[in-house]
C-alpha cells in the first residue's frame, strides 16, 4: 500500500547542487502495518526459526566456541556488502598477526566491525539501553583507524551526504539534512525504547533497521552499524541469548532487492514488502545457522572420538582440539596461551592431530608455525564463497 506520510522532502544545497533530501516520518508507521495472513505466517516462521537458533546456544556444549566464529562470519559478510574483499580466513590470520597474502586494509575494516559489536554487547550487558549513546560508542570503535579520523568517529555528521551516484544530482538517495538529525534521532531513540507504544521485538528490529539507514546519522559506517543493530536488538529483547544470527549473508545474496525495498519504504511507505523480505531473511539465516552449528557439532564429536584412540596422549590433544574450535587458525604459541599447556605438549598434540588429518600446518616453517582446523573452517566459510 502507499502511505500518505512516509516522510517529507526538503530542499538542500550541497556540492553546488540543489537537491531534495528525505526526512522520514517517526516510527511506528502511520497508517499502521497491514498484516495479511501471509505476512503474519512469515513472521511466525521467522520467530520459530529464531527460537531454534537460540536453543543451540542453550543446549550445544560448545555454543560459546561457535559464537567466536559466528560473530566474525557476520562481520565478514556485512563488510563485503560495503565492498571489502576480506575472507574469514583472512580475518583469523590478521587476528594472530599473520598477514602474508591478506588484504590488510580490508581485514582491518572487518576486525573493527567485530570490535564494534563486542563494544555494543558489553554496553548492553552493562545495562546501557539501546540508544544513540550506545551506537555512537560502537561507531567510534568502527571508525578507530587513521583513515576514519576524517569520518568523525562517534560523532553525528555535520554536513549533507548522499548515497549512490557520482554527485548529489544523480544520487540514488539523499538522507535528511544534518540540521534535522537531532529531531529524527530523538524519535528513533524513543521508538527503540517502546515509546510511544511497545512494538514486538522482531518487528521493531525490521522497522528500526530501515529508519537508521534512512536517517544515515554518520558520515561513514552506517550500513555496517545498521546491520549490527538488528542482532543487538534481538539480544536486548531476549529473543537471542547471543548474536548467533548472520543475516548479512541473506542481504548480500539479495543485495539488489535489499536496496530496492529500502527505497520502496522511502518512496511509497511500502513497509509490508520490506517486512516480508526481512522476515524471510531471518528465517533463512537462522535455519542456516542451526544447520551449520549442527554440522560443526557432528564434525567435532567425530574428531573427538578419533582423538580418543590416541590413548595417553588423548587428554592434551582434546584440550588443543577444543581451543581450535574457538580459533580455527592459530599459532602454536597462541595455543600454548589458550590451553595453559607447555609448548612441548602443544606441539606433540598438534603432531597427533596432523597425523589424524584434523589439523593442517599452513606455513611450512620451523618457527611461528600456523595451524588450521581445516574442515571446521571450511564448513564455517562455505556460505561466504
Image (spheres, helix red, strand yellow):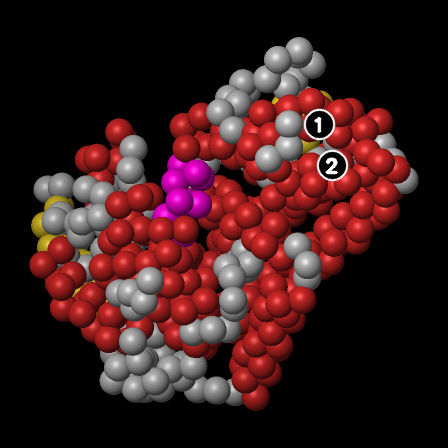
Residue at x-position 33% and y-position 43%: 142
For mark 1, what is the residue?
345
**Image position, residue 171 (x, y; %):** 28, 48
Most common secondary structure along the magenta stretch? helix
User: Could you say where residue 136 lies in the image, as x and y percent from the top left?
Assistant: 24, 53
**Residue appearing at x 81%, y 38% in the figure:** 314
* Closer to the camera in the image, 20 or 7: 7
Q: In the image, 48: left or right of 358?
A: left
Identity of the residue drawn at 36% across and 51% down: 119
The correct choice, above or below, for 176 with respect to 192 in the image is above
- Alpha carbon of mark 2 to alpha carbon of mark 1: how far? 7 Å
Q: Position of residue 109 (x, y in %)?
A: 40, 37
**Which comes sooner in the sequence, label 2 or label 1?**
2
Magenta stretch: includes residue 371: no
| Placement of the C terminus among the 4 image quadrants | top right
The answer to which image quadrant residue 353 occupies is: top right
Q: Quadrant of the N terminus?
A: bottom left
Res 344 seen here: yes
Identity of the residue drawn at 31% across and 51% down: 138
Q: Are marks 2 and 1 in contact (CB under 8 Å)?
A: yes
User: Callout 1: helix, strand or loop?
Assistant: helix
Q: Give the number of the disc on residue 368.
A: none
Q: Nearer the viewer, residue 290 or 361?
A: 361
- Residue 384: name its quadrant: top right
- Check the image and report above or below for 324 versus 31: above
Query: Depth check: 340 or 109 in front?
Result: 340
Q: Which residues are magenta?
A: 109-117
Q: Residue furthest top?
A: 366
Mark 2 surroundings: few (<14), some (14-19) or many (≥20) residues within 10 A:
some
Q: Which mark is residue 316?
A: 2
Q: Residues within 10 Å of mark 1 (few under 14, many from 20)?
A: some
Amino acid at each position: 500500500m502507499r502511505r500518505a506520510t512516509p516522510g517529507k522532502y526538503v530542499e538542500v544545497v550541497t556540492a553546488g547542487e540543489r537537491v531534495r533530501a528525505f526526512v522520514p516520518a517517526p516510527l511506528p508507521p502511520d497508517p499502521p502495518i497491514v498484516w495479511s495472513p501471509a505476512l503474519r505466517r512469515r513472521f511466525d516462521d521467522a520467530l520459530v526459526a529464531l527460537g531454534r537458533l537460540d536453543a543451540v546456544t542453550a543446549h550445544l556444549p560448545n555454543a560459546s566456541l561457535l559464537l567466536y566464529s559466528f560473530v566474525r562470519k557476520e562481520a565478514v559478510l556485512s563488510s563485503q556488502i560495503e565492498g571489502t574483499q576480506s575472507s574469514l580466513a583472512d580475518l583469523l590470520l590478521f587476528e594472530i598477526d599473520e598477514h602474508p597474502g591478506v588484504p590488510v586494509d580490508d581485514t582491518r575494516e572487518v576486525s573493527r566491525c567485530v570490535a564494534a559489536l563486542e563494544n555494543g554487547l558489553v554496553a548492553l550487558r552493562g545495562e546501557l539501553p539501546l540508544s544513540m549513546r550506545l551506537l555512537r560508542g560502537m561507531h567510534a570503535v568502527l571508525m578507530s583507524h587513521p583513515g576514519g579520523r576524517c569520518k568523525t568517529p562517534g560523532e553525528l555528521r555535520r554536513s549533507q551526504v548522499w548515497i549512490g551516484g557520482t554527485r548529489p544530482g544523480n544520487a540514488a538517495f539523499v538522507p535528511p539534512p544534518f540540521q534535522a538529525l537531532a529531531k529524527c534521532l530523538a524519535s528513533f531513540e524513543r521508538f527503540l525504547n517502546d515509546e510511544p507504544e511497545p512494538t514486538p521485538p522482531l518487528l521493531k528490529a525490521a522497522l528500526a533497521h530501515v529508519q537508521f539507514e534512512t536517517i544515515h546519522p554518520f558520515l561513514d559506517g552506517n550500513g555496517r552499524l545498521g546491520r549490527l543493530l538488528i542482532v543487538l536488538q534481538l539480544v536486548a529483547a531476549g529473543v537471542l541469548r547471543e548474536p548467533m544470527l548472520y543475516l548479512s549473508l541473506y542481504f548480500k545474496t539479495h543485495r539488489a532487492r535489499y536496496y530496492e525495498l529500502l527505497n520502496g519504504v522511502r518512496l511509497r511507505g511500502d513497509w509490508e514488502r520490506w517486512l516480508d523480505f526481512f522476515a524471510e531473511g531471518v528465517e533463512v539465516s537462522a535455519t542456516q545457522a542451526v544447520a551449520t552449528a549442527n554440522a560443526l557439532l557432528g564434525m567435532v564429536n567425530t574428531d573427538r572420538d578419533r582423538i580418543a584412540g590416541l590413548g595417553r596422549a588423548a587428554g592434551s590433544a582434546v584440550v588443543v582440539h577444543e581451543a581450535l574450535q574457538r580459533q580455527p587458525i592459530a599459532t602454536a604459541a597462541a595455543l600454548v596461551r589458550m590451553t595453559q599447556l607447555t609448548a612441548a605438549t602443544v606441539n606433540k598434540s598438534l603432531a597427533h592431530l596432523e597425523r589424524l588429518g584434523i589439523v593442517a600446518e599452513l606455513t611450512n616453517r620451523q618457527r611461528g608455525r600456523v595451524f588450521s582446523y581445516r574442515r571446521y573452517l571450511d564448513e564455517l566459510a562455505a556460505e561466504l564463497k
